[in-house]
Amino acid sequence: MPPLADIADDYALLESEDRYRLLIELGRLLEPMPDALKTEATKVRGCSALVWVYPTRTDDGRLHFLADSNAAITKGIVALVLAAVQDRPAAEVAAADIEAQLAPFELTRELSSNRTQGLPNMIMLVRDTAERLA
């Protein structure tokens, strides 16, 4: 996954249709999430699509998230959230202003409310996990 700043630079240069394609491509870049991890416990509530996020810890204590969705654009949105925090120490993730990092994407303006309604819950799940593990 490219750094979030690089993704934002590319995104800013694109028209709406191409932005959708970029989000779909980002979703394809996510590490595969085993079906066994797609449970009620890992499901993100409040999303119109099915979304799962599963936290793991690396040997050196950094957080690494696996995620998936049954909707291509939603999977791309999850990929953006993870690009903001992936493989960082739990304390850093807990303190991260993910909303500010995602602001340049103007997702609520670009996408229907149906597609973005679960975004706050995705962010909250990531942040709550980080706070618990920090």
Image (cartoon, helix red, strand yellow):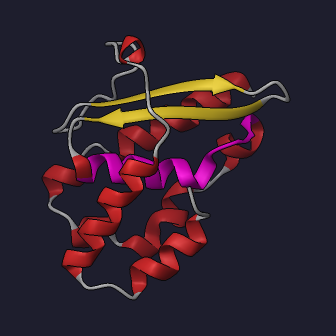
Position of the C terminus by quadrant: top right
Closer to us: 123 or 25: 25
Please state the horizontal and vertical placement of residue 4, each as a whole percent of the image. 57, 65
Give residue 67's quadrant in the image: top left
Position of the N terminus by quadrant: bottom right
Q: Is residue 80 magenta?
A: yes
Q: Is residue 61 magenta?
A: no
Report the predominant secondary structure element of the magenta stretch: helix
Question: Is 63 situated above or below 17?
Answer: above
Question: Is 80 situated above or below 46?
Answer: below
Residue at the image point whose x is 82% and y is 24% from the top: 59
Residue at the image point whose x is 55% and y is 64% from the top: 101
Q: Magenta residues, as a range?
A: 73-90
Please state the horizontal and vertical placement of residue 51, each as a whole percent of the image. 30, 33
Closer to us: 133 or 14: 14
- Total marks shown come to 0
Residue at the image point whose x is 23% and y is 37% from the top: 47
Give residue 108's quadrant in the image: bottom left
